[in-house]
Amino acid sequence: MDSKRQDVIKAMGTPNKVSFGDDSYTLEHWEYGDSYITFDRITGKVKEWKNYGNLKVSLGEKLDDAPAIMLGSSYIDVVKAEGTPYYMSKHDDGRMYWAYKITQYTSDSFTFDKNGNLIEFTTSGTIKVFIKIGETIYDNIKVGMTRDEIINILGQPSYQTDRNISYGDLSFTLDSNGKVTFIRQGSR
């Protein structure tokens, strides 16, 4: 993030294709196979990337003993838990969005405020997360639990359907057997 064009050329060489990504021509996309890097044309700095394995990008390696992630965690905490994301995007207001592809259909994602604090996350169960409600932190909630197990820990949800239960900014997606397949906490 924020690398200049010359830095990208040194690392990756000449792109296969260059295009402009929006109607106002403020974004410039450089393609390297299926992967791409997007620059802000005004600043000339990297604003986004999507890496399908061939980009030379790194924020750090995933650590086996990484701390659990929760709202308020830092960029560094997420890198320790997940490594370098396959997708990153920096919004004009300074917020950052990161995604980690888990399978063809699932990913873990993280949204950070302009100060680098985690304000929203979603997970399909690949990382350890702590759920924070008010001042209470729950470290025993995870993907694979049943609806009844969640309700036994957190009490009656503020909203529920056959496939979803919610507690304010915390929501769980359930499969047809009533087991949690996806957890989301935070608000944008």
Image (tube, grey):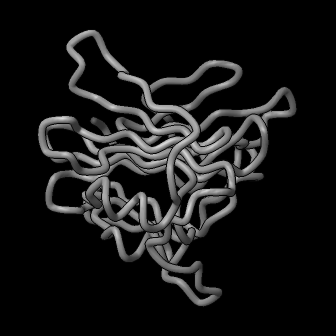
The residue lying at 66 percent from left, 38 percent from top is 34
Image label count: 0
Q: Which corner quadrant holds the C terminus?
A: top left
| Left or right for 98, reference 150 | left
The residue lying at 33 percent from left, 59 percent from top is 71
Relative to the observer, which residue lies in front, 24 or 15?
15
Rendered position, 167 above or below 26 = below
Rendered position, 166 above or below 32 = above
Q: Where is residue 1 drawn, in percent x and y?
A: 32, 58
The residue lying at 36 percent from left, 76 percent from top is 76
Q: Where is residue 31 drawn, in percent x and y?
A: 54, 38
Q: Where is residue 155 drawn, in percent x and y?
A: 50, 45
| Left or right for 151, reference 137 | right
| Left or right for 152, reference 2 | right
Rendered position, 87 above or below 76 = above
Relative to the observer, which residue lies in front, 69 or 1?
1
Outermost top residue: 23
